[in-house]
Image (spheres, rainbow, N blue to C red):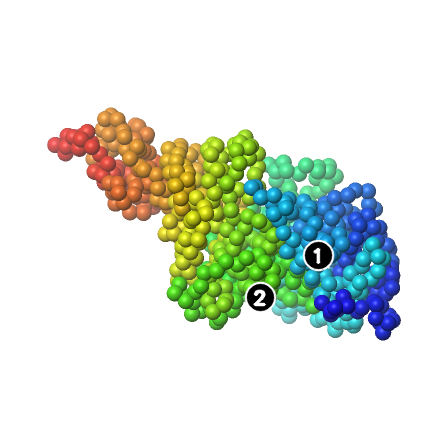
Amino acid sequence: MDADGGGPGGTDPTDPANSTTPATLADLAAALRTEAERTNGRRLLTIHGDRDACLDAAYTALDAAGVDDDGVTLLTTREGFRYDRLRPKHADQLLGTTRDAVVCDAFAEFSPNAVGQSVGAVDGGGLYVLLAPPLDGWPDRRDDFDESLAVPPFGVDDVTGRFRTRVVDTLRSHPGVAVYDAARESVERDGLTGAGAPPPEPGPRVPDDPAFPAAAYEACLTRDQSRALRELERLRSPGEAVVVEADRGRGKSSAAGLAAGALAAAGRDVLVTAPSFDGAAALFERARALLADLGALAGGGADPDDESDSDADPARDADPNRTDRTDRTLTATGGGRVRFERPADAAPAAADADAVVVDEAAALPVHVLGSFLDAPAAAFVTTVHGYEGAGRGFSVRFRDRLADADAGVTEVRLDDPIRYARDDPVESWAFRALLLDARPPVAAAVDEATPGTVDYRALGADDLAADEHLLREAFGLLVLAHYRTEPNDLARLLDAPNLSVRALSHRGRVVSVALLAREGGLDADTRAGMYRGERVRGNMVPDVLTSQLRDPEAGEPVGYRVMRIATHHAVRSRGLGSRLLSAVADEFGADADYLSTGFGATPELLGFWVDNGFRTVHLSTTRNGASGEHSAVMLRPTGDAGRALADRTAARFRDRVGAVLSDALHDADPDVVRATLRACEADPTPLVDCSDYEWRVVVGAAYGTGLYDAAPRPFRRLALAYLLGTESEPTADLDPREERLLVEKVLQGRPWEAVAADLGYHSPGECMRALGAAYRPLVDAYGGSVAREERARLDD
């Protein structure tokens, strides 16, 4: 920022040479609106000072700018305004909408997410108005969001203001951002860029030989959108995959909706999935509109089992074609349809549809995305730099899966904004302030990194805040580590007192990074409250072990949870992640009792954590709605208290998991169950303590004509003992198919017919015989004198 406070993109109103600088708020707002309309861009007006004065000033500014009340949304916790009002925590309701102005009251419930979710709703020619406390003191002010960062045992005084400092710096330096001091009634920065009208953008185009109806192309708003629709015609042919990427506000979901509607009009069954149905609303609306324009809309179908619509409206409910959250299917007159399923349900149904469209694909795990490649044709539509901040992770992580797929892959990117002109200063401000475009180093800078060439280092919050390049590299890698990263995560990284960042660098460039959360170390009163079911923020592992698994002392030891760990895609599979975890354990071992992690369990991830010394203590009984995964909790003790916690929790897992597998986990992936049990360090010896009668039943089924169904209990105990077996215990040697048979039939209690079909046995009878054969090595490994005598009797 210039010393005079003007800076680029804004003139200094105290300079006599700037005679055209607006002198009043009304003049400033009018000038900003005029320039925004001329450029088809947006402008940001920051009003800071006392809250009441800022709200009054916002009215003055919007009136002077000529913004109609109906075109304004005010994000505030207060009530009684003439504008449309939302609480800041509900700012996500603005996604996909268009407003002439959005006013964000940052005095209460302010969060980075609220800004990221609301700023894109402002139309070209509109204003984004930010109301803030005095900017010089804003970073030192604490509010609701800071309370959420103050996880026990830390208090709100331990939270810092680095993120707000970042925001203030961008407000005072970024082009297109005006700053008005409501207390002094003075214009600090006018935010005028002097830009003229942009050159006209080429309009949408109807191809000479479209496979989709011309009406679909005529509904496009930009040339980019019609080009994307042309590529989506490939979904008519089996074996095709289309990837559509764009920044938010480019009309990618609308293009996908037009494609879905065109396919349904042609009699195709189109399965749509997204992290939530609300996230696919724009897609469904465009599909519905196209079917209606074509005269092909037969009706919509409300989900009779969805009782989540608490705002029932009889008139609205009577409309068969409504596309709100309870309407999940559009039906075409020719028999085609567009239907929605949540990701966990859509994955197994993909092969039965004619085409699958995955909206906001970056917000789903890669293995879930890969399952949609089983569909005859699939489209993956995603935001590159959206408020989730996950698009680049999708680009990097999903490319490998696409490269291995049999489908022909077509990629298309939309660059032209729908609502405003390119190079909009408000969009670039949001990218800069919220770090939406953070990315790791280029591959060429790190491709020679190995465990022997890297340096282990702590990335302190002060270091990150002071070094934009370092912050972008580290945060860019963390974005890759998780399929859903949001602006709030940036504020947590900079301000939360319980978080630490550790990294490996190669020639000064970040190649691997771990985000750690301090947990536990809770006082007796907090632990007692947690045991009673009170939510204690930021203590995920102690909370699970205490409130769910009923260990009243689980919150006393201090642990560091590895929230995320990521290695640059150019140097994966070189041992850098393991090198980083080893260094973390060495550093924190003296100050912590254990390291922990929690994640959606897959065999591959479980194997990685086992290789790094972590052991299973819990597998959740519910699935993640987006990924369909059960979450695993794993511990790596670093001290005596951590070892005691891990030992007793693992033993309890051993004792209860058999019953859970036959109930809540009866449909869990057998390979996940196998890997989870193998990763548990509990002693399996108590499980083989069967009665003489039980041993005779098992031996009879293994070596004679006995039946598993006669007494399942000992079979379950022996199956668990085998799958939990360690190198120090007697072991048998079963192949993966036999182990899956133990899981599906013996532990999960699935019907013989289903098990036989799933594992490829010709009949239930063959499956039964295979189970008996699988128990022979278990009898030999674990059986005592009674088992040997029974086998000898059968051999005679």
Residue 647 occupies quadrant: top left
Residue at screen point 21% across, 38% down: 780
Q: Nearer the viewer, residue 105 or 32?
A: 105
450 sits to left or right of 130: left
**Label 1 element class:** helix
Residue at screen point 43% across, 62% down: 572
Position of the N terminus by quadrant: bottom right
Indicate which disc residue 571 carries.
none
- Residue 360 place in picture, x, y as percent: 59, 55
Residue reaching furthest to the left: 796
Q: Does 702 appear above or below 183?
A: above
Residue at screen point 27% across, 30% down: 689
Query: Crowding near pointer 1: few (<14 within 10 Å), some, many (20+)?
Result: many
Residue at screen point 42% across, 49% down: 589
Indicate which disc residue 469 carries.
2
Q: Does 560 appear above or below 753?
A: below
Q: Nearer the viewer, residue 711 or 31?
A: 31
Task: Using the rendered image of the protein, determine whether residue 98 is visible from the camera's viewpoint.
Answer: no
Amino acid tagged 1: Val
312 sits to left or right of 704: right
**Label 2 element class:** helix
Residue 32 occupies quadrant: bottom right
Amino acid tagged 2: His
Q: Nearer the viewer, residue 64 or 210?
A: 64
Task: Using the rendered image of the protein, determine whether residue 520 is visible from the camera's viewpoint.
Answer: yes
- Residue 99 place in picture, x, y as percent: 76, 55
682 sits to left or right of 72: left
Q: Looking at the image, do the residues carrying marks 2 and 1 touch, with CB atoms under 8 Å apart?
A: no
Q: Nearer the viewer, mark 2 or mark 1?
A: 2
Q: CA distance from mark 2 to mark 1?
A: 25 Å
Q: Which residue is mark 1?
A: 119
